[in-house]
Image (tube, helix red, strand yellow):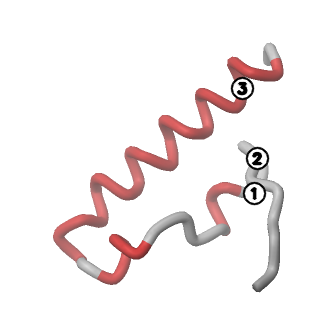
Amino acid sequence: MKEIKLEDKNIRDEHICCAISDKKSRDGYEKKKEWLKSQFRKLIGT
């Protein structure tokens, strides 16, 4: 298994959960990525 460091810069290209395989969950999946990106920025203060 490959370990990655998930950041606001690479979250767009990384697969973060299995919900992406279900098209009904796509909107929620994208919202989760946006939320995570905002949390990363808060953490590093940008």
Amino acid type, callout 2: Glu
Earlier-in-chain disc, 2 versus 3: 2
Q: Which mark is residue 41?
A: 3
Task: Please tell me which residue lies in front, 33 or 5.
Answer: 5
Image quarter (top left, top right, bottom left or bottom right) of the N terminus: bottom right
Amino acid type, callout 1: Asn
Residue positioned 30% across, 65% down in the render: 26
Along the horizontal axis of the image, is 27 left or right of 17? Answer: left
| Cβ–Cβ under 8 Å for marks 2 and 1 | yes
Q: Which mark is residue 10?
A: 1
User: How much space separates mark 3 and mark 1, taking CA atoms?
Assistant: 13 Å
Earlier-in-chain disc, 3 versus 1: 1
Helix, strand or loop at label 3? It is helix
Residue positioned 17% across, 70% down in the render: 24
Helix, strand or loop at label 1? It is loop
Could you classify mark 1 by the number of other residues whose Cα lies within 10 Å: few (under 14), some (14-19), or many (20 or more)? few
Q: In the rendered image, which residue does mark 2 sit on?
A: 7
Residue positioned 81% across, 71% down in the render: 3
Residue 5 place in picture, x, y as percent: 82, 56
Amino acid type, callout 3: Arg
Along the horizontal axis of the image, is 32 left or right of 21? Answer: right
Along the horizontal axis of the image, is 33 left or right of 38? Answer: left
Image quarter (top left, top right, bottom left or bottom right) of the C terminus: top right
Helix, strand or loop at label 2? It is loop
Q: What is the tally of numbered marks visible in this picture?
A: 3
Residue 6 place in picture, x, y as percent: 74, 53
Quick one: which residue is furthest to the front in this view?
1
